[in-house]
Image (cartoon, coloured by chain):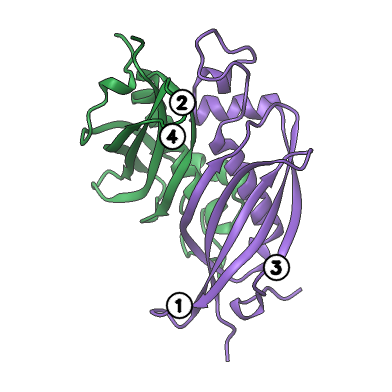
Chain colours: A green, B purple
Amino acid sequence: MDKLYFDDIAEHTVAEFGSFEMTQDEIIRFAKAYDPQSFHTEPLPPPGSAFPKLIASGWNTAAATMRMLVENWIVKCHVFPSPGIDELRYVRPVFPGDILRVRLSVIAKRKSASKPDRGIVNCRVETLNQNGEVVLAFKSIEFLKVKPA
Amino acid sequence: MDKLYFDDIAEHTVAEFGSFEMTQDEIIRFAKAYDPQSFHTEPLPPPGSAFPKLIASGWNTAAATMRMLVENWIVKCHVFPSPGIDELRYVRPVFPGDILRVRLSVIAKRKSASKPDRGIVNCRVETLNQNGEVVLAFKSIEFLKVKPA
């Protein structure tokens, strides 16, 4: 299948995709490497921890979300590297065994004023658990190539 | 040393700390797990990749930043889980061998209007490479405990 250009993206498109199981091993391995707080690294966090149960680092959930985005969306588009994201929120805790998926909503698109080879696509990204609850959300900014004339 | 409460944080404090080497192994391992795009997973990205050289996933740099924040800042404070971050920007590419550190600036603090046990501390977080260049930046939102009466 041909990859999508900026011109091919329709505003207000909504898509759901992906499946990522946040196993206890995954949560603890990530946290020991990048977010070593006891409520992310210990199956039974000690008294006085900032949260009383083991929950995934928000960065772990964000990274899992990125994997689902790459595999189901970004690989299908002609992209330039992204400049960043906005309003990353850890909406609900993610527990061991939760199975996550992504809901992507295209909010807006516009051509770049400074670089005629690309357009800017703004999306709302929501990560859902197996109960359909939003656990994490952010606004992504993506640069897509404009279709060659 | 006693941990810091909300009351102990001084606005406009600036601190630099941490050291994290972004080795090629680190970059490729993270990307294969969470951001499998060729310019993050291949020592020599193929023609047509979104970037012509191997660079770290922005999420990898963010995760490395979180580790330095936890080890040098968050462990020293009485925290509640964070609600999220704002304006995450991948300012410059991070290449294999880059050695990162963090500059943390306390921008503002205020007591929570709804929860009297905590205060909100807003920081600017910048990740610097070995040349002192900012490679990543975001605004953090942290909840700290108010000192018991």
Q: Nearer the viewer, mark 1 or mark 4?
A: 1
Q: For the residue marked with disc 3, what is the amino acid?
A: Thr
For residue A46, say whether it is visible.
yes
- Asked if labels 3 and 2 touch by Cβ distance under 8 angstroms, the answer is no
Cα gap from disc 1 to disc 3, whole angstroms? 20 Å
Same chain for the residues under marks 2 and 1 in the image: no
Query: Which residue is label 4 attached to?
Result: A66
| Badge 3: residue crowd in 10 Å (few <14, some 14–19, many ≥20) | few
For mark 4, give the secondary structure: helix
Q: Residue at x 37, y 44 (%)?
A: A139
Query: Which residue is label 1 attached to?
Result: B112
Q: For the residue marked with disc 2, what is the amino acid?
A: Lys
Picture layout, residue A85 above or below residue A146: below
Query: Which residue is label 2 attached to?
Result: A115
| Badge 4: residue crowd in 10 Å (few <14, some 14–19, many ≥20) | many
Q: Tell me the chain of label 1.
A: B
